[in-house]
Amino acid sequence: MRVDEYEIKEELYYTKDHEWVKIVEEEAIIGITDYAQKELRDIVYVDLPEMGRKVKQGEKLCEVESVKAVSEVYSPVSGEVVEVNERLEDSPELINQDPYGDGWIAKLKPENLEGDVKNLMNAEEYAEYIKSLEH
């Protein structure tokens, strides 16, 4: 699905802060949306979260730095960080090139997935949200 020039993946859930989460079995893969990476422009650094760190839904997960600004990335779900995308340390631009694929940021073992998902948007709702921002 596309809204203007922004790509939105159907199988993901979204936050109003432009993070996405993909649920794969017992894992939540997290990144920032195409909209977010285009707003930030050239991403030059990612301050990855610590392994084993527990976060609550909506809590700061990490920071992404671009030539334009430093932005906080908030966790779309509660859980424990079980993996981080170490490729971003040397190649933060992966977020710009492939925000929904190679540019993922962290994987969490979710704690309250069923409850957390109720607070997130599906692709259609996120598309409407983006449209509302541009007017």
Image (cartoon, rainbow, N blue to C red):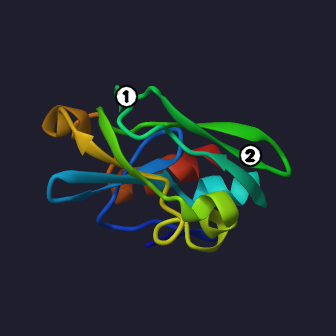
Above or below for 48 versus 22: above
Residue 63 in picture, x, y percent from top left: 63, 39
Q: Residue at x 60, y 60 (%)?
A: 88
| Residue 120 showing in the rendered view | no
The numbered mark at residue 118 is none
Q: Which residue is mark 2?
A: 65
Query: Considering the image in quadrants, where does the N terminus appear?
Result: bottom left
Q: CA distance from mark 2 to mark 1?
A: 21 Å
Residue 11 in picture, x, y percent from top left: 29, 65
Between 22 and 123, which is closer to the camera in this rendering? 22
| Residue 86 showing in the rendered view | yes
Residue 114 in picture, x, y percent from top left: 14, 38
Above or below for 54 versus 49: above
Between 128 and 24, which is closer to the camera in this rendering? 24
Q: Is residue 48 left or right of residue 70?
A: left
Graded by Cα atoms within 10 Å as few (under 14), some (14 to 19) or many (20 or more), the crowding at tag 1 reads many
Q: Residue at x 72, y 51 (%)?
A: 45
Graded by Cα atoms within 10 Å as few (under 14), some (14 to 19) or many (20 or more), the crowding at tag 2 reads some
Between 1 and 65, which is closer to the camera in this rendering? 65
Q: Is residue 77 left or right of residue 91?
A: left
Give the amino acid at mark 1: Val
Q: Is residue 77 left or right of residue 105?
A: left
Q: Which SS class for mark 1?
A: strand
Give the amino acid at mark 2: Glu
Residue 17 in picture, x, y percent from top left: 53, 39
Q: Residue at x 55, y 51 (%)?
A: 130
Q: Which residue is mark 1?
A: 55
Q: Which SS class for mark 2?
A: strand
Q: Is residue 121 left or right of residue 126?
A: left
Above or below for 71 versus 25: above
Q: Earlier in the sequence, mark 2 or mark 1?
A: 1
Q: Which image quadrant is residue 4 in?
A: bottom right
